[in-house]
Image (cartoon, grey):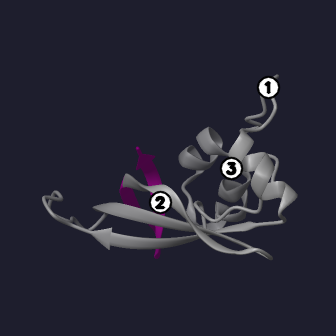
Amino acid sequence: MVFTWYPATDRTQNDAYRRARDWLTDSLAQRMIVDARTQRAPSVQWAHWAKQQAKVIADVNIECSGCPEDTDTVIRRVATIKQSAVSGSGTHTVQPDTTVWVTIVRDGDRWLIDEIRY
């Protein structure tokens, strides 16, 4: 969810964190659910997607090559995110792929994303 965007209605990519709030720890949500607008206009790519009414859909592949050992309360993984911009003019692959390191922590009977590092 964090890497699926709706540029026609999202002000910034951070809006995706708001949609994913139920899967985030409070500390990650506080860091990421912020108004990230600047004095500059959105990127040229973001503006192009918005004009096309495109949806940027994420396909996430989770891996664990060299990850620290899991514990009862913490899991660390590497995620590769492949995005596709889908609009009326077709589907286009977003380049390059994004790789992030994710920390997931146990919160009672749930697992929540606590950290996403680029």
Q: CA distance from mark 2 to mark 3?
A: 17 Å
Residue 67 in percent (x, y) is at 18, 59
Which residue in the structure is indicated by mark 1? 40
Q: Nearer the viewer, residue 95 or 3?
A: 95
Q: Amino acid at mark 3?
A: Gln
Which mark sits nearer the N-terminus, 2 or 1? Answer: 1
Q: Nearer the viewer, residue 83 or 26?
A: 83
Q: Is residue 87 above or below residue 112?
A: below
| Principal secondary structure, stretch drawn in magenta | strand
Q: Secondary structure at mark 3?
A: loop
Mark 3 surroundings within 10 Å by alpha-carbon count, few (fewer than 14), some (14 through 19), many (20 or more): many
Q: Secondary structure at mark 2?
A: strand
**Residue 9 in sight:** no
Range of residues picked out in magenta: 101-118
Which quarter of the figure has residue 5? bottom right
Residue drawn at x 63%, y 65% as measured from the top left: 4
Residue drawn at x 33%, y 71% as measured from the top left: 62
Q: Nearer the viewer, mark 1 or mark 3?
A: 1
Q: CA distance from mark 1 to mark 3?
A: 15 Å
Q: Nearer the viewer, mark 2 or mark 3?
A: 3
Q: Is residue 45 left or right of residue 11?
A: left
**Residue 51 in sight:** yes
Which residue in the structure is indicated by mark 2? 113
Q: Which mark is residue 13?
A: 3
Q: Is residue 116 inside the magenta stretch?
A: yes
Q: Amino acid at mark 1?
A: Arg
User: From this viewpoint, which residue is outermost toward the front?
Assistant: 89
Which mark sits nearer the N-terminus, 1 or 3? Answer: 3
Q: Nearer the viewer, mark 2 or mark 1?
A: 1
Q: Secondary structure at mark 1?
A: loop
Which quarter of the figure has residue 98? bottom left
Mark 1 surroundings within 10 Å by alpha-carbon count, few (fewer than 14), some (14 through 19), many (20 or more): few
